[in-house]
Amino acid sequence: MAKSQDDQALWSSPFLGDAQLDATLDLPTSKSMMARALILASISKRPSLIKRPLRSRDSLLMRDGLRALGVEIDEIEVEGESAWRIRPQPLKGPAKIDVGNAGTVMRFLPPIAALAEGEIRFDGDERSHERPLRPVIEALQSLGVAIAHDDRFALPLTIKGAGQLSGGEVEIDASASSQFISALLLASPAMSGDLTIRHTGRSLPSLPHIEMTIAMLKDRGIDVEVDSDSRTWRVKQGSGMIEIDQITIEPDLSNAAPFIAAALLMGGRVRIKDWPVSTRQAGDSLRSIFTLMGGAFTRVGSDIEFTALGRDALEGIDIDLGDVGELTPTIAGVAAFASSKSHLRNIGHLRLHETDRLSALATELRKIGAQVIENEDSLEITPLSNRDHVSRDDEVIIESYDDHRIATLGALIGLVVKNVKVRNIATTAKTIPDFPALWQKLIQPVSSRPSGN
């Protein structure tokens, strides 16, 4: 697929030098929760509302895919605020579904399409053809679903839906993505029999995302039995039917990462509004991780306030990020400016995300002078040895690789390094509808760093 002019555009990242931050931000809502809410609402017994919906590229792709299957989804206002009204309908084809490069869409929708009558064609961006789908394809085939994929076990593919999906026992290797397990769990309430899922792989990344799926199912009356020792999940037929009145989507805590990290680099204060007291989001781990790296979190009413002294107080970190791999690009960016080395471990699955994130991070951080050892499933980062990066005059182009988290990394680097330009900042719209405007709000107003720091 040829790159558009927008894909090639360079965005000049704002440079702050030694200024400190003082910002309060209202972040867009959670991509992960939004995807799950749309699926559950679409197989509910009655119409429902999604409040505080996320209108990002991934969410719109999920919406359009469900609409193609017959679900009625309307954007409305409730008490002056945006909401989506979902009216479940009998699922049917023929239909064509564009997954873009959204892992949730390409993995969550095939089990739902199997519930439809007729042929459902799936395709997406060029990168989507390379991303792992074999486990969910093989799982559905073991449950009797007919899938044509030219023996590639990848996109593009066609599902020949029979109008129902029986349960059964499924063995699945979810080492590449926890989304394979969530995809089956989300469809389980609409299956005609019990469903048992057994993970057969050695590792299971991003476990909090599976826990989010289970919590959202349980909140809507579906009992999921979990055997952690055997890594098995079971949903019994008759344990409940999805009945939803409304779902309110939380702020996306993983997307808070670059904004909070900015305070680690610059010093100052960043407050994130409506940070939930209790949540299954992986991004909640930022509170413990960034505290270890030199910052401090305080709850202020319904908000979280993060304060830090800046790069002079920034510590490196040795940490297993297997459960929260999506935070890796931001943590790696912070580590490049720390006072000691960092080792980010158990992140090999990131090679199969929107891009090979380990390779991309190593390449881009080396451009600013950090030393990066790229191992099979980890990164070792030796930070810049001095602060020459602040005064350099040569242009630094950070490639986004059409990956929203690499693009936000470029913005973060640009706060400290002069003349940083990010290619295709528009890719951040995957999860943040208007990232450049929100970034501008982060840095306005700023204050000068006190002398002596």
Image (cartoon, helix red, strand yellow):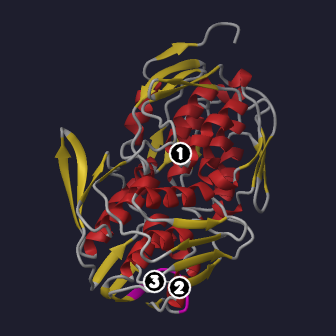
Residue type, label 1: Ser
Which residue, given by chain and number where applicable, does mark 2 sit on?
168
- Give the quadrant of residue 19: top right
Q: Could you tell me which residue is drawn at 65 percent across and 22 percent down?
A: 310
Of helix, strand and loop, which mostly describes the magenta segment? Answer: loop
Please report the bounds of the magenta region as a residue range: 151-159
Q: Which numbered dot is residue 193?
A: 3
Label 2 Cα crowd, 10 Å radius (few <14 / some 14-19 / many 20+): some
The answer, for residue 364, to whether it is visible in the render is yes
Q: Position of residue 408 (x, y in %)?
A: 52, 43
Label 1 Cα crowd, 10 Å radius (few <14 / some 14-19 / many 20+): many
* Residue placed furthest toward the front: 238
Q: Which image quarter is the C terminus in?
A: top right
Q: Position of residue 446 (x, y in %)?
A: 48, 18
Q: Give whichever of discs 3 and 2 has the lower sequence position.
A: 2
- Which element is circle 2 on? strand
Disc 1 vs disc 3: which is toward the camera? Answer: 3
* Image height of 95 relative to 254, above or below: below
Task: Give the alpha-carbon distance from disc 3 to disc 2, as whole Å.
Answer: 7 Å
Task: Give the alpha-carbon distance from disc 1 to disc 2, as whole Å.
Answer: 34 Å
- Which element is circle 1 on? helix
- Give the quadrant of residue 368: top right
Considering depth in this image, is 169 or 36 the residue closer to the camera?
169
* Image height of 398 relative to 102, above or below: above
Left or right of 345, for residue 185: left
Q: Which image quarter is the N terminus in?
A: bottom left
- Which element is circle 3 on? loop
Which residue, given by chain and number where applicable, does mark 1 sit on?
254
Q: Position of residue 42 (x, y in %)?
A: 31, 67
